[in-house]
Amino acid sequence: MVFYALCVTAELENLTDLQPLGGCSDPEYAYYFKVKCENCGETSQKEACVTLSDSFQLPTGRGTANLVQKCKLCGRDGTIQMLPGHGEPLTLQQSQSGSEAMLMVFDCRGFEPIDFSFGNGWKAESTSGARFEMDLSEGEFVEYDEKGECPVGISNLRASFKVVKKHERAGKTTFV
C-alpha cells in the first residue's frame, strides 16, 4: 500500500483557508482525478470520482474502499481508500511562502492518483472575515470583498499528489 497526499498551492489575494465547502474531510465533496495502473502504466481516460460517503466492497470480499475499479488495459483491480482527518486548508501564510497544504490522504492499492481537477464546491475566507464560495474549475477566482473593501482572488492554482509515510506516535497517526 502506498499513501498519497493531495497537496495544493495557489497565490491567494486577501483570502485564507482555501478548502472544500464542508472542510477537508467533507464526506460529500467529490475529488476528481485520473488514475494510473501500477501494473501496466495505463492512465484512465476518464476521471475517477472519489467521495468519503461512497463505499464499495473489495474484490476479495474483505472490507470496503471509496473506489474500486479495474484497469481497462490489464484487467487488474485497483482500490483507493480516503483517510480523513489529516488535511488542512491552504492559508494565506502558506500561499505567501510558496508552501503547500495537504488536503486529503489516499491509501492506494494498484492505482496511482494523477491529474487532480479542481471544480465547484470550494470556500475561503477573506482577511476581513467575509466568506466566499467558489467554482475553481477555471483555475482562478476573482471577486470584491465589500466588508473589507478590497479585491480578493486566487491564481496559479496547482495540485499534486505526493507519496507520504504513515507515522504512529502516542496513539496518533500522522503523514509526512
Image: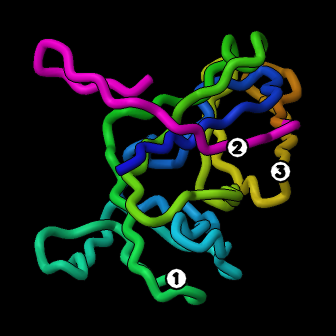
Cβ–Cβ below 8 Å for labels 1 and 3?
A: no
- The secondary structure type at the circle numbered 1 is loop
Which quadrant: the C terminus? top left
Cβ–Cβ below 8 Å for labels 1 and 2?
A: no
Say which residue label 1 marks.
71
- Residue 11, image x, y percentages: 82, 27
Q: At label 1, which amino acid type do we have?
A: Cys
Say which residue label 3 marks.
139
Relative depth, front residue between 66 and 37: 37
- State the separation of the CA atoms marked 1 and 2: 24 Å
In the image, is 8 to the left or to the right of 139?
Answer: left
- Look at the image and say whether residue 103 sits in the magenta stretch: no
**Residue 28 occupies quadrant:** bottom left
Relative depth, front residue between 60 and 102: 60
Q: At label 2, which amino acid type do we have?
A: Ala
Question: Which residue corresponds to the image point at 78% horizontal and 13% vertical from the top-left?
Answer: 96
Question: Which residue corresponds to the image point at 19% horizontal and 21% vertical from the top-left?
Answer: 172
Q: Which of label 1 and label 2 is nearer to you?
A: 1
Magenta span: predominant SS is strand
- Residue 132, image x, y percentages: 66, 40
Q: Which of label 1 and label 3 is nearer to you?
A: 1
- State the separation of the CA atoms marked 2 and 3: 10 Å
Q: Residues within 10 Å of mark 2 (few under 14, many from 20)?
A: many
In the image, is 43 to the left or to the right of 109?
Answer: right
Q: At label 3, which amino acid type do we have?
A: Gly
Way the structure is coloured: rainbow
Question: Which residue corresponds to the image point at 53% horizontal and 47% vertical from the top-left?
Answer: 20
